[in-house]
Amino acid sequence: MKIDRMKITFNNNFEKIVERDNVRNFNSLIEWLEMFNNGENVSLLTMSGKELGSSFSIDKNNVKSIEIL
């Protein structure tokens, strides 16, 4: 199954949809998702958007859930 979209829900209930075509390091997010959902220790991950200035970071302390769409 090819994963193209994910929904990240932050602790403040903000939801962000992330698409493979809009993020440079989408495969790193897939690995982060698997580790996070397995309860493993995950570090800060900064996602780089393909548009200038469109980056954001996720951390285990600010993410409530992450799921494949």
Image: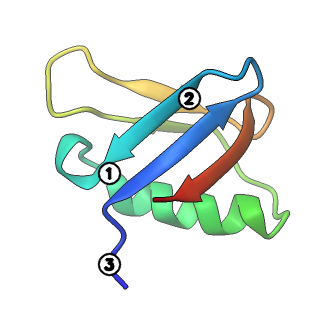
Q: For the residues carrying marks 2 and 1, which lies nearer the camera in this image? A: 2
Residues under labels 3 and 1: Cα distance? 15 Å
Residues under labels 2 and 1: Cα distance? 19 Å
Asked if 26 appears above or below 52 in the picture, the reply is below
**x, y (%) of residue 62?**
74, 28
- Local crowd size for mark 1, using a 10 Å CA cut-off: few (<14), some (14–19), many (≥20): some
How many numbered discs?
A: 3
- Local crowd size for mark 2, using a 10 Å CA cut-off: few (<14), some (14–19), many (≥20): some
Kindly check if marks 3 and 2 are in contact, taking CB atoms under 8 A apart as contact: no
Q: Name the residue at 38% across, 42% down.
A: 18
Residue 15: give its label.
Answer: 2
Residue positioned most to the front: 69
> What's the residue type where badge 2 is placed?
Glu
Q: Sequence order check: which comes first, mark 2 or mark 1?
A: 2
Q: Secondary structure at mark 1?
A: loop
**x, y (%) of residue 12?**
74, 17
Q: Sequence order check: which comes first, mark 3 or mark 1?
A: 3
Residues under labels 3 and 2: Cα distance? 22 Å
List the residue tagged with mark 3: 2
In which quadrant is the C terminus drawn? bottom left
**x, y (%) of residue 41?**
81, 57
Residue 59: name its quadrant.
top right
Horizontal side of 54 relative to 36 (left or right) equals: left
Residue 48: name its quadrant.
top left
- Local crowd size for mark 3, using a 10 Å CA cut-off: few (<14), some (14–19), many (≥20): few
List the residue tagged with mark 1: 25
> What's the residue type where badge 1 is placed?
Asn
Asked if 11 appears above or below 30 in the picture, the reply is above
